[in-house]
Image (tube, rainbow, N blue to C red):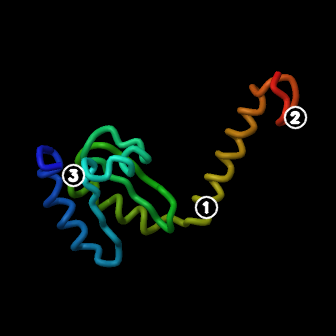
Amino acid sequence: AEWCGPCKAFGPVYERVSEDHPDVLFAKVDTEDQQALAGSFGIRSIPTTVVFKEGVGVFMQPGALPEEALQDLVGKVKELDMDDVRTMIAKQEAEAKAAAGDDAGCCSDPSCSN
């Protein structure tokens, strides 16, 4: 957004880090033009850094990151073992589903409305 001072301050940092990592796709989203996309990620403040690896969201943080922190983040994401990440996500989803089932009512029948 043109009016976003922190976005303008973060811009040069973002550009330098993206130039240091030509093997990584960096992209910017104008949240005013792409409100539905921003909303789908729950972005409430800008700038917000969102990082994906192999199609999986692995990091999201509002606020401008200092250059050293962004460089460190890119390095850590490059090192992620995505098989481990997917296993962890599956475990968390199973635990959440089990916890929701505990509060679902009188029985495990999904058609039961009690």
Q: Is residue 79 above or below residue 69?
A: below
Name the secondary structure under disc 1.
helix
Three-letter amino acid code at the position of disc 1: Asp
Image quadrant where residue 18 sits: bottom left
Residue at the disc numbered 3: 66
Asked if marks 3 and 1 touch (Cβ < 8 Å), the reply is no
SS at mark 2 in the image: loop
Dot 2, how many residues are within 10 Å of its Cα: few (below 14), some (14-19), or many (20+)? Answer: few
Q: Tell me the kind of residue under disc 3.
A: Pro
Mark closest to the chain's N terminus, 3 or 1: 3
User: What's the mark number on residue 106?
Assistant: none
Identify the secondary structure beneath mark 3: loop
Tell me if label 3 and label 2 are in contact, CB under 8 Å: no
Q: How many marks?
A: 3
Q: Position of residue 97 (x, y in %)?
A: 71, 40
Q: Nearer the viewer, residue 28 or 70?
A: 28
Could you say which disc has been placed on residue 84 in the image? 1
For label 3, count other residues whose C-alpha is less than 10 Å away and answer few (under 14), some (14-19) or many (20+).
few
- Asked whether the beta carbons under mark 1 and mark 2 sit within 8 Å of each other, the answer is no
Location of the C terminus (image quadrant): top right
Residue holding disc 2: 109
Residue found 39% across the figure and 58% down from its top: 51
